[in-house]
Every structure is written in structure tokens, then in C-alpha cells.
Image (spheres, rainbow, N blue to C red):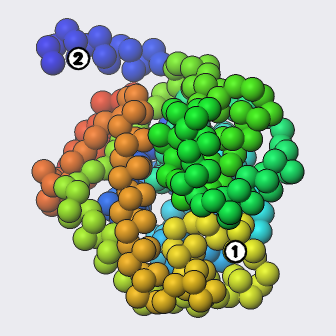
């Protein structure tokens, strides 16, 4: 970058009156949590969980929720805010997150979203306008019955026939979202992907002075970390956690218990899988999920990728991240990076 370009960029930063927002994303098990704590302490930031399942109380192990005593005094938000039997949507998250951001900013702190749920994070960063399409409970039941009779792939094929773009993004086993996309088409006559695209198109520019950072690493190394994390969760008592939720009356069909780790273990507890098969399935599904996360994040504009394989030392990684932040926000972070 030339000196003139640096000068122009500095002027642009100074002229940007939008409130600052820092976001750190990446696939599961890549190492967001430890780095986010260090950054939050250095920057005087408060962390907002960008994980769609950490909102649920009692779902701690399977969501890799950081225990309170390990948060090192850093405030964490949007964790444990609803019951597992409740439904919490991306639109709900956006509303709660925007309120939280305003509250953090009013106290002179930096809001810092950390998580791997791409839709949730992007909805806040770019101010998606979610469409209310209503619901058709009878239609949902009929589609669920169809999947039970003919199988999840057949239901997915029905979606592909009316909305190939949405079908391409959804796994055939993700019955809830496949049914939702079919329901939107049934009630509006328009493809869900089209309406979703319009929602994104309404927000061409972030309402925030956004610094968006993504972590990545070599795929096989990431998969090893995922397998290790699953083993660790099982050792911490994931099976007992799922059993407890079911004993409390949380339906196995609920949104919460369709989450990774909970769905597979619930199948084991119901006798539909033996233990080893459930663990194998969980590891495979988590690897596939990480792949989908990376695909989503690669389409997020303004995201600055940091390859952890090129920065093996924690100090080098911290300096790299601080350099990105210092290049975006109009205040001096040089002392932090030293």
C-alpha cells in the first residue's frame, strides 16, 4: 500500500461515524474461544455469543459453552436466555443482539460477536430484513409424515423441484429447514431462496463500522481437532446431559435437540443407534457442519481471513489480529500488539 493510499484509508476511518463492531467467526473447534478472551481483555470488549445453540439453558457440554468461572471476568451475552423447549430464530437473535450491542456501546465498551452460526452473525452485521411468512402447521405435519413414509431424500427432492437454490444449501437430513423452505413456497408462492436473497440485498452496507475476522486452518488438522473435541465432550458427560434434557420433557423433535451432539446422542438413548455408531455419526456430522460453515463464511463480504497454519505461535496470531483491528478502527492499538 502506498503512502497516499494509507493516508486516504486513515481519513476514511476517521470519517466513519458508524458505531464499531468486532466479529470473529470460523468453523467449530478452530480456536475462537481462547483467542476471543484474550482480545476482549485487551480491547475492553464484551463478547456476544454468535452460536445458535448457546442461547439454550442446560445445553452446556454439547455447545462447548464456556463455563462462567473460565470467562476471566469478560462479560458474555446471549447465553442461557431461553429454554430448550422454546424456538429461537435468526430474527430473534438479530433483535436481541442489536439491543445488546446498543447497551454495550452505551457503556463505552466494544461489542464483540464470536461464533460460528453464519446466518446469525451475518444478519446482525448487515442488518437483514427478515420477512414474516406466517406458518401452516397442517402443511408442516403433512411434510413430516411424507418424510417418515418416503424418507428425507425424497422430501429434499420435493424442495429441489421448486427451489433448487435452497435445496443446494440444505442437507437432506436437515428436515426442519427443508420443511420450512417448502412451507415458505407453499404460503407465498415464491422460493425461499429468492426471499432470503432479497433480505440480504436490502443491506448492501453494514450499519456498523465492521471489523470481521475469520479463522481457518488446514482441513485435516481441523478434522482432528473436531474428533478430539467430540471425545472430550463425551468424557465431560454429554450423554448424561442429553438424558437429563429428555427427562425434563424436552421433545427429541425440538429445535434444540436437533443440534449437533444432541440429535445423535438422543438417537442412541432411544435405541436407534448403538453407542459407537452414534459417536461415529456425530464426528462425521460435525466435520460436515464445519465444511458448511466455511462455505458460508467465504461468501461474507469484508471478511479478513487469518490462516492459523501460517501463524503457529499464539503471540504471532495475536499480533496479526490486532493489526487487522488497528487498520479498521480509528484508535491506536499499537501498545496492545507489542
Give the Cα distance between marks 2 and 1: 55 Å
Helix, strand or loop under label 2: helix
* Residue 21 appearing in the image: yes
- From the viewer's perspective, is residue 99 above or below residue 282? above
- From the viewer's perspective, is residue 56 above or below residue 27? below
Q: Nearer the viewer, mark 2 or mark 1?
A: 1
Give whichever of 190, 61 is nearer the camera.
190
Image quadrant where one finds the N terminus: top left
Give whichever of 327, 31 is nearer the camera.
31
Residue at the (66%, 41%) spot, across then down: 181
Provide residue 54's location: percent of width, then percent of height.
Answer: 59, 64
User: Which of the numbered marks, if any, corresponds to residue 252?
Assistant: 1
Q: Residue 106: name its quadrant.
A: top right
Helix, strand or loop under label 1: loop
Q: Earlier in the sequence, mark 2 or mark 1?
A: 2
Give whichever of 59, 10 is nearer the camera.
59
Provide residue 122's location: percent of width, then percent of height.
Answer: 52, 37
Q: Residue furthest front?
A: 150
Q: Residue 132: name its quadrant.
A: top right
- From the viewer's perspective, is residue 133 above or below residue 74? above
Residue at the (53%, 25%) spot, across then down: 206
Provide residue 320's location: percent of width, then percent of height.
Answer: 22, 45
> Label 2, on which residue?
6
* Residue 319 appearing in the image: no
Judged left or right of residue 329, residue 86 is: right
Amino acid at each position: 500500500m502506498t503512502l497516499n493510499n494509507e493516508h486516504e484509508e486513515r481519513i476514511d476511518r476517521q470519517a466513519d461515524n458508524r458505531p464499531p463492531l468486532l466479529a470473529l467467526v470460523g468453523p467449530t473447534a478452530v480456536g475462537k474461544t481462547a483467542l476471543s478472551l484474550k482480545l476482549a481483555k485487551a480491547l475492553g470488549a464484551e463478547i456476544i455469543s454468535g452460536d445458535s445453540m448457546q442461547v439454550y439453558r442446560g445445553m452446556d457440554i454439547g455447545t462447548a459453552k464456556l463455563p462462567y468461572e473460565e470467562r476471566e471476568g469478560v462479560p458474555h451475552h446471549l447465553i442461557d436466555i431461553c429454554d430448550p423447549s422454546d424456538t429461537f430464530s435468526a430474527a430473534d437473535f438479530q433483535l436481541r443482539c442489536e439491543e445488546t450491542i446498543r447497551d454495550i456501546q452505551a457503556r463505552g465498551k466494544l461489542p464483540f460477536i464470536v461464533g460460528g452460526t453464519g446466518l446469525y452473525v451475518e444478519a446482525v452485521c448487515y442488518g437483514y430484513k427478515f420477512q414474516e411468512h406466517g406458518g401452516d402447521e397442517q402443511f408442516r405435519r403433512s411434510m413430516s409424515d411424507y418424510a417418515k413414509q418416503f424418507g428425507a431424500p425424497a422430501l429434499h427432492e420435493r424442495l429441489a423441484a421448486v427451489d433448487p437454490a435452497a435445496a443446494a444449501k440444505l442437507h437432506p437430513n436437515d428436515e426442519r429447514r427443508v420443511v420450512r423452505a417448502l412451507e415458505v413456497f407453499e404460503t407465498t408462492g415464491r422460493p425461499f431462496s429468492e426471499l432470503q436473497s432479497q433480505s440480504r440485498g436490502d443491506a448492501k452496507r453494514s450499519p456498523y463500522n465492521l471489523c470481521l475476522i475469520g479463522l481457518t486452518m488446514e482441513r485435516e488438522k481441523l478434522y482432528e481437532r473436531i474428533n478430539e473435541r467430540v471425545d472430550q465432550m463425551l468424557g465431560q458427560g454429554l450423554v448424561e446431559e442429553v438424558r437429563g434434557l429428555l427427562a425434563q420433557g424436552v421433545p427429541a423433535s425440538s429445535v434444540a435437540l436437533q443440534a449437533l451432539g444432541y440429535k445423535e446422542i438422543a438417537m442412541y438413548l432411544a435405541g436407534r443407534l448403538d453407542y459407537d455408531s452414534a459417536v461415529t455419526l456425530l464426528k462425521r456430522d460435525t466435520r460436515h457442519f464445519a465444511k458448511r460453515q466455511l462455505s458460508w463464511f467465504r461468501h461474507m463480504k469484508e471478511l479478513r481471513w487469518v490462516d492459523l497454519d501460517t501463524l503457529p505461535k499464539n503471540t504471532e496470531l495475536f499480533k496479526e489480529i490486532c493489526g487487522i483491528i488497528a487498520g479498521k478502527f480509528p484508535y491506536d492499538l499499537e501498545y496492545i500488539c507489542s
